[in-house]
Amino acid sequence: MASSQKTRKYVSLGKRSVTEEEEEDMLSMFDVSRGKTTERIVLQRLILIARLPQDLADRTELGAHYEKLNFQLKKQHMLDNMTGLLLIYPSCLLHVIESSRDVLVSVLKDLTDMQQQPDGAFLEASKVVLMAQNPQSRLFPQWSYKVLEEDQMAGESKSFEEEEESTETLVCCVLSALQKLSEHLEGSKAVPGSVLDESPELIVSQNVLNKLLTRDELLTPQQHLQMYCSPLNVIMNAECSAFTRAPRK
């Protein structure tokens, strides 16, 4: 009789105990109320932009390069699921990567290596638009890329060419457009590429990205990696305490 009974695990909760099934229900309701997905990693989000060389004949080569990189990173970091979106414009690219810090650093290192290739790099100037620590949820359910054509840029507003917008305003425009695209994808099995074909107004403005590429306030991938890899020295004495970067040799 005892062997046929379902084994229950009890968890202490204040002055009473709850079963494992009740505990799972509570966790699920908590996650829903907080609007978060369960992650095995400390999720981070990286948004990169880069200028394409004018003589780049086949932009699909960039998509193939990042597909290969994504495959390699999945093998190296099996639990660090990588999601995001790569948009390849006629003159630049926008890359959103959501994963662990290790994966994001690998993407940054790969980008710097690509730019240093002597025999015709895929990419020229590049900038880090945003590095978000522990965002509440992912913007995209998987990683994919889309090559955008010139006619899809035809409806872009020219206001950013006529007015001098602040860097903060331009960054907010990028984030707002990505959020709208993410909301449009909710509850749908469609990939971002097909959604952008049907609704080109959801495409992040190429004009905005080109303006951001000229802004010195944004770090390059090399500068970001230098800051991340540079150790901190802690200086403390009777009068003051401060954190300083160790000098680079």
Image (cartoon, helix red, strand yellow):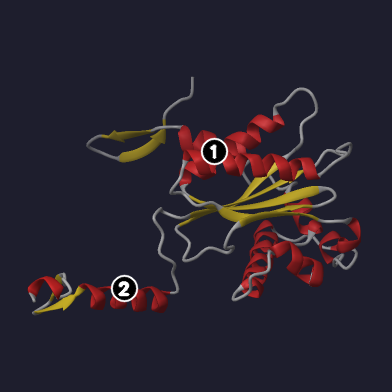
Could one spot residue 60 in this view of the protein?
Answer: yes
Numbered circle sitting on residue 106: 1
Q: Amino acid at mark 2?
A: Leu
Q: Quadrant of residue 34?
A: bottom left
Q: Residue at 78% across / 48% down in the picture?
A: 92
Identity of the amino acid at label 1?
Answer: Ser
| Residue toward you, 9 or 159 | 9
Closer-to-camera residue (233/96): 96
Name the secondary structure under disc 1.
helix
> Looking at the picture, how far across and down is residue 6, in whole percent?
18, 74
Q: Residue at x 81, y 57 (%)?
A: 207
Q: CA distance from mark 2 to mark 1?
A: 33 Å
Q: Quadrant of residue 151?
A: bottom right
**In the picture shown, does residue 115 fall above or below 160?**
above
Residue topped by disc 2: 27
SS category of the residue bearing label 2: helix
